[in-house]
Image: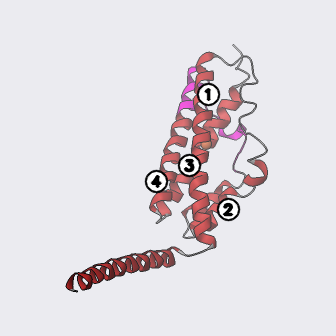
Amino acid sequence: MSAPTFLPLLNSIAVNEAKGQKLLGAWAAATQDADLKAALTFVSIREGEHAMAFAKRMCELGHAVDEASAYQVFKNFDDLLACACSDTTDAEKVEMLTRGDSEQGERKDPFRNFFKDPSIDPQTGALLGRFIAEERDSGRRLKAEYDRVRAEGRGTSKPAMDEIASLKACVSSLEAELKSLRKMIAAGR
Ligand SMILES: [Fe+2]
């Protein structure tokens, strides 16, 4: 039996999702930002599960994952991984990892051709459908975090933001104290 025509697609997903898991997992381990860490960990777990699910589907179809023939989503994976592991700021990592996304991401839907092959069987089709929906959800989660990290990186540093937050809390408690003092004075009159 000849290999299904959609096999290269499954292979490419299996290979690149495994790389995504590595990359995001390394960044999650390096960051001190709790919200970013949570999002990166979640998406990294998802990427790993996708890699395994597609490798499993390939096995069921009688084929093994072949890294050498896969389309490479991450052209400079080793550099990206080194950057993710490093103590570079999160804002710089966002820039490094999303470079080129704004030109490609919005205009092109990377999943637009996934169902063009009419020979995709129902089981593979169901897996692809779940994969696409989860990838889009992961993209939204990461974008929300990247936007926040970028905004913090552009403007105020994290320690400065903490300082501002504690000054605000201090002002609020002084206001409350002042209010109760005024009440006491008013009551004494
Ligand atoms: Fe992915």
Which type of secondary structure does the marked residue at label 2 adopt? helix
Q: What amino acid is labelled 1 in the image?
A: Gly
Measured along the vertical axis of the image, is residue 11 above or below residue 147?
above
Which quadrant contains ligand 1? top right
Q: CA distance from mark 2 to mark 4?
A: 20 Å
Q: What amino acid is labelled 3 in the image?
A: Arg
Numbered label tally: 4
Which type of secondary structure does the marked residue at label 3 adopt? helix
Q: What amino acid is labelled 2 in the image?
A: Met
Mark closer to the observer (2, 4): 4
User: Which comes sooner in the sequence, label 3 or label 1?
Assistant: 1
Measured along the vertical axis of the image, is residue 169 above or below residue 19?
below
Measured along the vertical axis of the image, is residue 59 above or below residue 85?
above
Mark closer to the observer (3, 4): 3
Q: Residue furthest left?
A: 188
Give the residue at x 26% y 83%.
Answer: 186
User: Which comes sooner in the sequence, label 3 or label 4?
Assistant: 4
Q: Position of residue 67 (x, y in %)?
A: 66, 40
Q: CA distance from mark 3 to mark 1?
A: 19 Å
Q: What amino acid is labelled 4 in the image?
A: Ala
Which label was assigned to residue 141?
3
Q: Is residue 143 magenta?
A: no
Q: Circle 1 is placed at which residue position?
A: 129
Q: Residue 87's quadrant in the figure? A: bottom right
Give the residue at x 74% y 22%.
Answer: 5
Q: Position of residue 57 (x, y in %)?
A: 57, 25
Q: Residues within 10 Å of mark 3 (few under 14, many from 20)?
A: some
Give the residue at x 58% y 51%.
Answer: 142
Q: Circle 4 is placed at which residue position?
A: 38
Q: CA distance from mark 3 to mark 2?
A: 18 Å
User: Which comes sooner in the sequence, label 2 or label 4?
Assistant: 4
